[in-house]
């Protein structure tokens, strides 16, 4: 898919779910595919307990954006300190990504358009114009939108934000 190496590529550390996660994400986003898969060889070290032939890394593309998923063992876990933002043009698009990415995830982590998927990766599913709405020069409009956003208990309703903006 990408002839040129992307300058910055997110690398996601999984315990043993790298291939499953890459396939899952690629099934959700258009213009996505699985790239090269590398496997552990005979080499062993103190950092992993994988067998020869087990998946080590999976290169994958989500809507043309390059990622790498690594099976590195249980040493590190995802936190909300890092999240992926998905900008959505319509409520239908927002609903699609919310439904797919939240499936099997942590429902307690769903607030203000944020969710944590079944692998523990955090996502922000937001309207494409959210930044413009909350940074509007009319501070009253921007404030109402921010207030409506912060009152959101899970998935964002674009119409609610626009109503707050237009009030």
Image (spheres, rainbow, N blue to C red):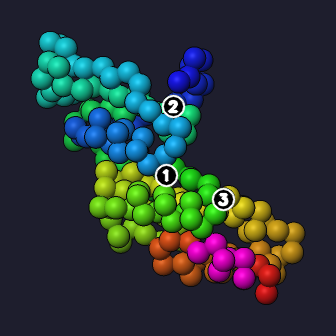
Q: Residues within 10 Å of mark 2 (few under 14, many from 20)?
A: many
Q: Do the numbered discs 3 and 1 sit on residues whose CB atoms are within 8 Å? A: no
| In the image, farthest residue toward the top | 42
Mark 3, Cα crowd under 10 Å, few <14 / some 14-19 / many 20+, is few
Q: Is residue 81 visible?
A: no
Camera-nearest residue between 41 and 96: 96
Q: Main secondary structure of the magenta part?
A: helix
User: Tag 1, which secondary structure?
Assistant: strand
Report x, y in % for residue 62. Answer: 50, 39
Q: Nearer the viewer, mark 3 or mark 1?
A: 3
> Would you say 95 lies left or right of 138 here?
left
Q: Residues within 10 Å of mark 1 (few under 14, many from 20)?
A: some
* Magenta region: 157-163
Residue ID for mark 3:
89
Which SS class for mark 3? loop
Q: Which disc is residue 66 wearing?
A: 2
Q: Position of residue 154 (x, y in %)?
A: 47, 73
User: Can you say whether 150 is above or below 74 in the image?
Assistant: below
Closer to the camera, 61 or 114? Answer: 61
Residue 127 seen from this side: yes
How far apart are labels 2 and 3 at the CA level?
A: 22 Å
At x 77% / y 74%, what residue is drawn? 142
- Mark toward the viewer: 2 or 1: 2
Q: Which residue is mark 1?
A: 83
Task: Give the structural element (helix, strand or loop) at label 2.
Answer: strand
Query: Pointers 2 and 1 in contact (CB under 8 A)?
Result: no
The disc, 3 or 1, on the residue closer to the chain's N-terminal end is: 1
Q: Quadrant of residue 126?
A: bottom right
Question: Is 77 a magenta residue?
Answer: no
């Amino acid at each position: 898919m990408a002839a040129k190496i992307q300058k910055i590529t997110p690398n996601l550390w999984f315990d043993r779910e790298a291939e499953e996660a890459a396939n899952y994400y690629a099934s959700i986003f258009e213009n996505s595919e699985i790239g090269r898969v590398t496997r552990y060889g005979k080499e062993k070290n103190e950092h992993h307990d994988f067998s020869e032939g087990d998946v080590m890394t999976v290169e994958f593309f989500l809507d043309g954006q390059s990622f790498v998923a690594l099976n590195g063992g249980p040493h590190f876990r995802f936190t909300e300190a890092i999240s992926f933002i998905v900008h959505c043009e319509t409520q239908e698009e927002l609903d699609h990504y919310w439904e797919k990415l939240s499936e099997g995830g942590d429902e307690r982590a769903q607030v203000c358009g944020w969710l944590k998927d079944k692998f523990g990766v955090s996502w922000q599913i937001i309207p494409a114009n959210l930044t413009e709405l909350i940074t509007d020069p009319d501070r009253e409009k921007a404030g109402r939108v921010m207030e409506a956003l912060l009152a959101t208990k899970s998935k964002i309703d674009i119409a609610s934000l626009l109503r707050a903006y237009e009030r």
